[in-house]
Image (tube, rainbow, N blue to C red):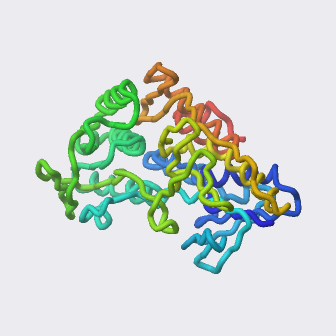
Amino acid sequence: MRVAVLGGGYAGLLVTRKLEERLPPGDELVLVDETGDHLVQHELHRLLRYPDLVDDVSIPLTELTERADVREATVEDVDTDERVVHLDDGTLDYDVGVVALGSQTADYDIPGVAEHATPLKRIEHAAALRREFFDVVDTGGGTVVVAGAGLAGIQTAGELAALAEGEGVADAVEIVLVEQADAVAPTFPARFREAAHDALADCGVSVETGTTVTAVGEDDVETEAGSFRYDALAWTGGIRGPDALDGERRDVRADLRLDERTFVVGDAARVVDADGERVPASAQAAVRASPTVAKNVERVLNAARNDEAVEHLEKWAFETPGWLISVGDDAVAQLGPEVFRGTAANVVKSSVGLTYLAEHGSLRAALRVLREELGDERVVPEP
């Protein structure tokens, strides 16, 4: 039997690691990823200030897996009826498949976005945005706009503001965060939204909510209320499904099954969980859904091996202890009903990120990130 896991992000990696423990030795486990590296997405914004961290937030999948066959290829299409994956270098058939291809940045067909804006989904995007920031600095200053004030947009704007402060150019480079809704982090609880807005203001970000972008020109952003100039533009305005799924995020219920032999997990899925709740697209949700997918893959395989129907699949309910974001050198944390900022929030944010790196990445990566955050390499020795 062959299991094909498509995508080496949070969901794909963690499902693969669980299956390495659960599948019998005779089963084949293939992990397909476009780059062959696992990107620690929740640390990507840090590369705007700390580009030297690139080798620690992008880790070869072969270092993180034990028995899986890691295949570096681009998934172009998934034929679930025939159980065949079409790759840029051939095809791969499967007995059970897991689609964990993540999401791509959505431009909503707004004219000019694809041509003029830089997303922040890959390492090369962070490098490009950092170059664009310093181009603004080198030409005497100007305005850097971040469009979209979800969690990614908030962290991007905060990191750029901290970069401007650290480079001593905060007076010359204005960071503006634009959001269509009436608040930043619009889908999150009110107290969390308010704390995030305050943290952005405190680090020098100008926040423009209730602003709908209608078009982007070479040096201006058009909105329903008029236009304004920009010198660099980051686009974090939303997500869509991967190209291999025709740009769609597939709807699934709590068992995360797309059809009898195919599952979908992570940002490629729109999940209604066992409690009937719509699950937010987030790294946290991808991580928490992965054990359920692995268990259900095992059950489907066992039934197929015996030519039997699957009697029961586990259903997943999303439960979160809270939400954490960094805003430059500040952080906002919500744990239960409590929302806090500053040192305590930073400790929680760093602990969560470092725990992930240590458990699913590497101790080397965790220690390097910690040194950067503490700002003193003497605090933590090299491993």
Residue that protrudes farthest toward the top in the picture? 338
Picture coordinates of residue 249, whole percent (x, y): 48, 57
In the shown orientation, is residue 327 left or right of residue 115?
right
Residue at coordinates 21% horizontally, 41% vertically from top-left? 210
Q: Nearer the viewer, residue 17 or 199?
A: 17
Residue at coordinates 51% horizontally, 57% vertically from top-left? 250
Which quadrant of the figure contains the C terminus?
Answer: top right
Residue that protrudes farthest toward the left in the picture? 226
Label tally: 0
Picture layout, residue 100 above or below residue 1: above
Picture coordinates of residue 263, whole percent (x, y): 63, 57
Residue 379, quarter of picture: top right
Q: Nearer the viewer, residue 332 or 19?
A: 19
Q: Nearer the viewer, residue 51 or 344?
A: 344
Q: Is residue 285 visible?
A: yes
Picture coordinates of residue 43, whole percent (x, y): 52, 45
Residue at coordinates 70% horizontally, 41% vertically from top-left? 359
Picture layout, residue 249 above or below residue 90: above
Residue 319, quarter of picture: top right
Picture layout, residue 204 above or below residue 219: above
Q: Nearer the viewer, residue 352 or 232?
A: 352
Residue at coordinates 50% horizontally, 28% vertically from top-left? 346
Residue 340, quarter of picture: top left
Picture coordinates of residue 278, whole percent (x, y): 48, 41
Which quadrant of the figure contains the N terminus?
Answer: bottom right
In the shown orientation, is residue 64 left or right of residue 23?
left
Q: Is residue 166 visible?
A: no
In the shown orientation, is residue 323 left or right of residue 81?
left
